[in-house]
Image (tube, helix red, strand yellow):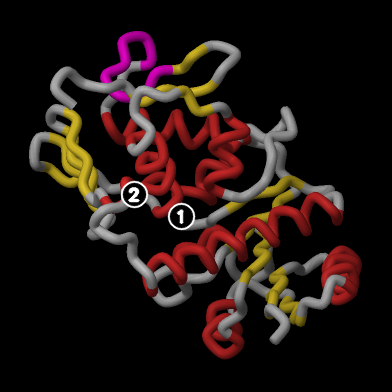
Amino acid sequence: MNKKILIIEDDTRLAELVANYLKRQNYDVEVHPRGDTAEEVIKQLLPDLVILDVMLPGKSGFDVCRDVRPFYKGPILIMTASEDDIDEIIGLELGADDYMSKPVEPRRLLAHIRALLRRKESEIVEESHPESETSPLSRTKLVFGNLVIDKDNRAVLIDNKPVDLTTAEFDLLWLLASHAGQILSRDDILNALRGIEFDGLDRSIDARISRLRRRLGDDLENPRFIKTVRAKGYLFLQWEGE
């Protein structure tokens, strides 16, 4: 069965161009032009993936993303004409899985869509077939001093106090922490989280690292957890006794 994609976009010409391109890639595509009725459409269609514009009639894409997250668990890819990094930060914090700026190159968009769908399918497989107790990946709780990361409950504690993270932020933290002591490049991180390669322009990983540091109360100059290794990537610091 073909994957179903819902495009929520009020630019009719752009929506048709994207929809026609994705249909040629064997996706079932629906287009909806408004934000104030988007939530009901998502409930009815239950698409495998949503492409969501920010500036929409009746309700912004940011508000739509926030309001549908309690019931819609599929990937949300936000597209916007704005070049302001703050839009990316807001979208990811509200529960979006990916972010692209317009104009969108069709093949690059397709790569992002395929990566998001692959990641969702792998999550379903992991839930259905958990790792055996003897697997190195079977660890579901990591402790670094006063920081506890619980994969099963997707919970993070510092000094026994919960840290509120988005899904994307938790996935990034778990990836870094489960490879503590190893430098992960941006390419490593993008491949692990999205299944795509770093193109030298994508700044979403840097923005997400910055937000994650703030959530953890980490210091860029004197990090306790996440260290930037110049020209190489990021390193989650090992603690003595770990």
According to the picture, the residue beneath numbered tag 1 turns out to be: 94
State the residue in front, 75 or 54: 75
Q: Quadrant of residue 2?
A: bottom right
Amino acid type at circle 2 is Leu
| Residue depicted at 55% across the width and 59% down the height | 119
| Residue depicted at 26% across the width and 19% down the height | 224
Magenta stretch encompasses residue 159: no
**SS class of the residue under badge 2?**
helix
Quadrant showing the N terminus: bottom right
Quadrant showing the C terminus: top left
In this picture, residue 193 sits left or right of residue 133: right
* Crowd tier of the residue under label 2, counting other residues whose Cα lies within 10 Å: few below 14, some 14–19, many 20 or above: few
In this picture, residue 127 sits left or right of residue 47: left
Q: Is residue 200 above or below residue 100?
A: above
Could you say where residue 19 lies in the image, as x and y percent from the top left? 84, 72
According to the picture, the residue beneath numbered tag 2 turns out to be: 137
